[in-house]
């Protein structure tokens, strides 16, 4: 790549970016309509006032208090929780709590069975009636390639493995918990990703929080995206490095930070930074946006930084061969220094991995917290990953993997297009299987979840604090296991509920001029 | 000029609303000393200059030209991402276990008797547990594909939580999908910046990570030394009296382990409870090694000492030792545990435990409840192993007779940790050649706060027979004599 020395950073962005993308990169984050924003703030204001009123009534015993209380013997201890910390939980979250933690009693596949819950006291306690809501369409589980199944080759292989190996391991990798299955898995993952070597861990969250501290320390700089996952933030914090945040997916912001960091060095002492690590994710699960990987790699090469790519949602879900966001952009995996991902989403198992050069993985084998102190992965889980990965790669002799990849891509395009046509505000990239649908108002969060469940569709709604306060949303995860009929049924229900709750906020031209819209290059934030 | 000056003053004064007669004005003008006029003139010119100059940015250290910046960027060389690792680093090549890690384990191709996995109750090989896990697999598949909040809560999770709470006789329990993450997520959920935590020096690494994530003040007291802890608590009391308003909002916690993994001894729980009520501190108890081991029914160190379980604010344990599954749990009163459902990072932001592992844990609990006699058997075996290993030349046994995981440390260290490790590794290799599987206790040397001395881990399980224990002790003695002469 011939990078010229250009004085103004914006020019670098303009000049080389158009040649870095092999296909159109279309993302949209439509602006919140002003009226909706005003009404949302008003809604929160009214809820806060009512919250204070209810707290007052509870304090003065006019209303029965359902909250658990401290022990009598410990009443004079310093209180464990501050009242205001839990204000939001007590007064807003409790009202719509039935939309979360819904228990299921079947495979979390395209259709699932939910346990019916009723609440006699407005969500403070729940009782199970014993009824089961059958065949609820699952738009909430991260089942992108449909490997969450209890029949088929994966389940059979995992069963055999359970019989042979058992379920637990009871030791760490460095001690006596390193099974031959672990080594088999690591070789396979390295081959799947196209890297030299890889390492697997028992929990995706812990993969980040235990390995980032092993890679950076004091005197290093971490540049982290605004909307990074809690595990990345925790790992960066535990490492002790300086953390600077750049605007979400904004390459100018990242470049400015890189330049400032190298030119000015560490704060106050101005010593040069030992190393700079850029933390980005493949698909951001709350926004549905895909990282601008070609530009990030160009920047990383220019400024000699290291790149840590967290592909929790994008591995298996993006790319013509399912190898993640690197495959999607057609780039070289060796350009990404540390490729991290999880097995929970597309492979239907649990755990995480890190892939990269052999020196990196050897170092992690010695210094990662997980290999020394945490129990290694359970054998049937490993077998599930091995079988599903071989299926995606086509090595099991069938074309099932390739079919599922195509099906996912078709489903994503269809689903997004139909929702867009209906007039909802959808965030994110056109190719991402994570589809956030904006709700904005707090009452609509609860209403949407409940109305969709009445129509036998299980959806996920998210509000504050996972999202900014006025941007609450419903998030759909499209799966390869969804058939066209299921998607149509879901779409009809969404449209009905959208009309009922007046959710069709979009003011973009939805019929006719689709063609000119979707092929505009690098449509970025419309702030 | 003077006329113009006078006129401007004239108009200014008129604009201010004062009615000055022109004559008087000119008179005042003439009477004013020269320096006064010059000063006013300079002042006016200065104001005009300030009004038109650029704003001064405090942060701008733009004393570098663009060219200099480019040069700096060009010159900067980062360290390599990871420092090079030598090929013959002793821990680089793991021991490979072929097949299940059961009582007869095949390590590096040799079949050995397992004295290294934390399989205290022998449930790794249990056919009942495997069967239940299989049934669960046939019903639910393998993974849960989501965190607990988003359709990742299965009925088996709810059942396991109820069963654990019932077993431990507490109000509520919460499950995590990774043992390490349990206490490391629980501590930061309650203790924030500004709070104070008193922790034992020998606390395990996951506790240390939890403390680091919480950003609280951490005060270490000497291992199992209640006087040292009381001294720290008294000091804190004196601090509190200086600033009572602040003291009323600072939370205090003591974090201890029931059975310490690093030193294999038991914490003095009754004394801790006394200190708790005297100084108003909450206790968090980490029971990974003592759950399913101590106590008449295996309920851990609270049952062992006969302490009321409500006196302990939070008990955390992992299900990877006695329960032979994966994951961890916290139990206690609902008032305490329910908070973690929204603020435990490892709970909210991570996928839930695969249902087959939860079913395996439930079945293991069933086995524990049906046959409380195994705890007695385990405790007897622990005492037996402890006695058998006494008197090994050159090695000392670290740990209480009741501890199921003992440490064998060198009596006389060679002076360097690397050499000590080499000697101990030689003993382990010797034992493995004679079909006794042992392992070195592993630590991250640079990260541990109080690094324990190098040691060999010897684990007792109910499946080991008398004869196997004797054989193992004999083997270790031979190894010590041969290698440590």
Image (cartoon, coloured by chain):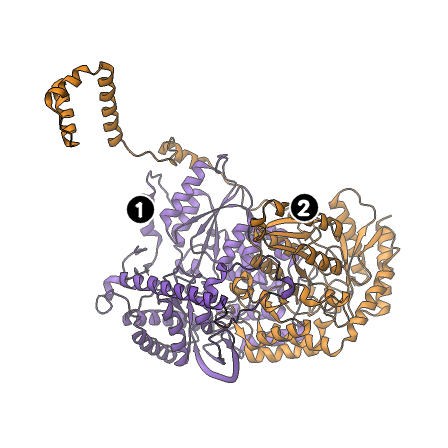
Chain colours: A purple, B orange
Q: Residues within 10 Å of mark 1 (few under 14, many from 20)?
A: few
Q: SS of the residue at dot 1?
A: helix
Name the chain letter of the residue that bears numbered label 2: B
Of B308 and B480, nearer the camera is: B308
Give the number of the disc on residue A15.
Answer: 1
The residue singled out by tag 2 in the image is: B235
The x, y position of residue A415, in whole percent, is: 35, 72
Report whether A341 appears left or right of A420.
right
The x, y position of residue A282, in whole percent, is: 44, 59
Of B174 and A309, nearer the camera is: B174
In the image as oriented, which residue stretches furthest toward the bottom? A131
The x, y position of residue B284, in whole percent, is: 65, 60
Q: Say whether mark 2 and mark 1 are on the same chain.
A: no
Q: SS of the residue at dot 2?
A: helix
Report the number of numbered marks: 2
Which residue: 44% across, 40% down?
A: A261
Q: Quadrant of the C terminus of chain A?
A: bottom left
Q: Is residue A220 visible?
A: yes
Give the number of the disc on residue B382.
Answer: none
């Amino acid at each position: 790549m011939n990078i010229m020395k250009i004085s103004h950073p914006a020019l670098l962005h303009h000049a080389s970016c158009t040649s870095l993308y092999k296909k159109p990169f279309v993302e949209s984050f439509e602006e919140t309509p002003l009226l909706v924003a005003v009404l949302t703030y008003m809604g929160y204001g009214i809820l806060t006032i009512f919250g204070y009123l209810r707290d007052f009534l509870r304090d003065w015993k006019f209303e029965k208090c359902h909250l658990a209380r401290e022990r009598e013997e410990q009443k004079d201890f310093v209180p464990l929780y501050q009242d205001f910390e839990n204000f939001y939980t007590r007064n807003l979250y409790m009202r719509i709590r039935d939309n979360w933690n819904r228990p299921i009693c079947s495979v979390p596949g395209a259709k699932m069975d939910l346990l019916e819950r009723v609440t006699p006291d407005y969500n403070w306690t729940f009782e199970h009636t014993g009824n089961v809501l059958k065949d609820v369409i699952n738009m909430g589980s991260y089942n992108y390639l449909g490997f969450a199944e209890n029949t088929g080759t994966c389940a059979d292989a995992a069963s055999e493995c359970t019989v042979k190996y058992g379920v637990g391991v009871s030791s760490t990798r460095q001690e006596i918990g390193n099974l031959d299955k672990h080594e088999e898995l690591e070789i396979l993952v390295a081959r799947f990703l196209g890297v030299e070597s890889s390492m697997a861990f028992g929990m995706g969250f812990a993969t980040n929080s235990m390995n980032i501290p092993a890679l950076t320390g004091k005197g290093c700089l971490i540049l982290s995206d605004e909307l990074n996952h809690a595990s990345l933030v925790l790992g960066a914090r535990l490492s002790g490095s300086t953390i600077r945040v750049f605007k979400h997916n904004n390459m100018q912001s990242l470049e400015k930070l890189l330049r400032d960091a190298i030119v000015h060095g560490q704060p106050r002492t101005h010593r040069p930074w030992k190393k700079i690590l850029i933390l980005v994710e493949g698909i951001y699960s709350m926004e549905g946006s895909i990282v601008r990987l070609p530009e990030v790699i160009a920047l990383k090469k220019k400024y000699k930084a290291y790149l840590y790519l967290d592909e929790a949602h994008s591995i298996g879900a993006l790319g013509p061969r399912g190898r993640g966001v690197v495959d999607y952009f057609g780039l070289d995996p060796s350009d990404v220094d540390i490729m991290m991902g999880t097995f929970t989403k597309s492979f239907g198992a649990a755990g995480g991995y890190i892939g990269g050069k052999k020196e990196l993985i050897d170092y992690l084998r010695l210094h990662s917290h997980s290999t020394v102190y945490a129990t290694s992965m359970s054998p049937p889980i490993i077998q599930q990953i091995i079988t599903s990965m071989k299926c995606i790669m086509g090595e099991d002799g069938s074309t099932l993997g390739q079919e599922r990849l195509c099906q996912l891509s078709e489903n994503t395009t269809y689903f997004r297009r139909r929702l867009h046509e209906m007039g909802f505000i959808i965030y994110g990239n056109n190719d991402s299987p994570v589809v956030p649908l904006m709700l904005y108002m707090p009452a609509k969060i609860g209403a949407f979840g409940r109305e969709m469940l009445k129509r036998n569709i299980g959806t996920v709604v998210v509000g504050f604090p996972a999202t900014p306060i006025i941007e609450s949303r419903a998030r759909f995860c499209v799966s390869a296991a969804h058939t066209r009929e299921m998607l149509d049924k879901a779409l009809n229900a969404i449209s009905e509920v959208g009309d009922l709750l007046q959710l069709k906020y979009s003011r973009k031209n939805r019929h006719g001029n689709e063609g000119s819209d979707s092929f505009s290059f690098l449509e970025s934030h419309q702030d | 000029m003077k006329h113009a000056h006078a006129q401007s003053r004239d108009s200014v004064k008129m604009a201010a609303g004062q009615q000055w007669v022109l004559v008087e004005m000119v008179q005042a003008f003439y009477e004013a000393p020269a320096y006064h006029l010059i000063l006013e003139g300079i002042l006016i010119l200065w104001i005009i200059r300030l009004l038109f100059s650029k704003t001064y940015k405090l942060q701008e250290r733009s004393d570098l030209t663009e060219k200099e910046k480019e040069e700096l960027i060009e010159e900067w060389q980062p360290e390599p991402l990871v420092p090079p690792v030598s090929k013959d680093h002793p821990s680089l090549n793991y021991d490979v276990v072929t097949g299940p890690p059961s009582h007869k384990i095949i390590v590096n191709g040799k079949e050995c008797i397992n004295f290294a996995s934390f399989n205290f109750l022998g449930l790794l090989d249990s056919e009942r547990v495997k069967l239940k896990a299989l049934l669960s697999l046939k019903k639910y598949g393998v993974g849960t594909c989501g965190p607990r909040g988003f359709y990742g809560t299965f009925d088996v999770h709810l059942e396991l939580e109820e069963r654990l709470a019932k077993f431990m006789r507490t109000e509520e329990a919460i499950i995590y999908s990774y043992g390490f993450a349990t206490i490391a997520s629980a501590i930061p959920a309650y203790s924030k910046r500004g709070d104070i935590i008193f922790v034992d020096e020998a606390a395990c690494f996951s506790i240390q990570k939890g403390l680091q994530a919480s950003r609280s003040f951490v005060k270490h007291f000497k291992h199992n030394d209640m006087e040292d802890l009381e001294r720290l608590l008294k000091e804190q009391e004196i601090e509190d009296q200086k600033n009572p308003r602040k003291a009323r909002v600072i939370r205090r916690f003591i974090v201890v382990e029931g059975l310490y993994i690093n030193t294999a001894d038991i914490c003095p729980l009754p004394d801790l409870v006394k200190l708790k009520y005297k100084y108003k501190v909450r206790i968090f108890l980490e029971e990974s090694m003592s759950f399913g081991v101590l106590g008449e029914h295996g309920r851990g160190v609270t049952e062992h000492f006969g302490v009321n379980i409500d006196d302990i604010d939070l008990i955390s344990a992992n299900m990877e030792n006695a329960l032979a599954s994966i994951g961890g749990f916290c139990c206690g009163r609902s008032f305490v545990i329910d908070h973690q459902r929204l603020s435990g990072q490892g709970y909210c932001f991570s996928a839930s435990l695969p249902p087959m592992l939860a079913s395996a844990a439930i079945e293991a609990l069933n086995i524990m409840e049906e046959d409380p006699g195994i705890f007695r058997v385990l405790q007897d075996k622990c005492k037996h192993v402890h006695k058998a290993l006494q008197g090994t030349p050159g090695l000392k046994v670290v740990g209480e007779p009741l501890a199921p995981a003992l440490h064998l440390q060198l009596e006389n260290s060679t002076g360097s940790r690397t050499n000590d490790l080499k000697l101990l590794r030689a003993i382990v290799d010797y034992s493995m050649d004679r079909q006794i599987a042992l392992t070195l206790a592993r630590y991250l040397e640079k990260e541990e706060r109080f690094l324990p001395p190098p040691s060999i881990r010897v684990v007792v399980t109910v499946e080991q027979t008398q004869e196997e224990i004797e054989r193992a002790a004999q083997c270790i003695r031979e190894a010590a004599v041969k290698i440590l002469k």
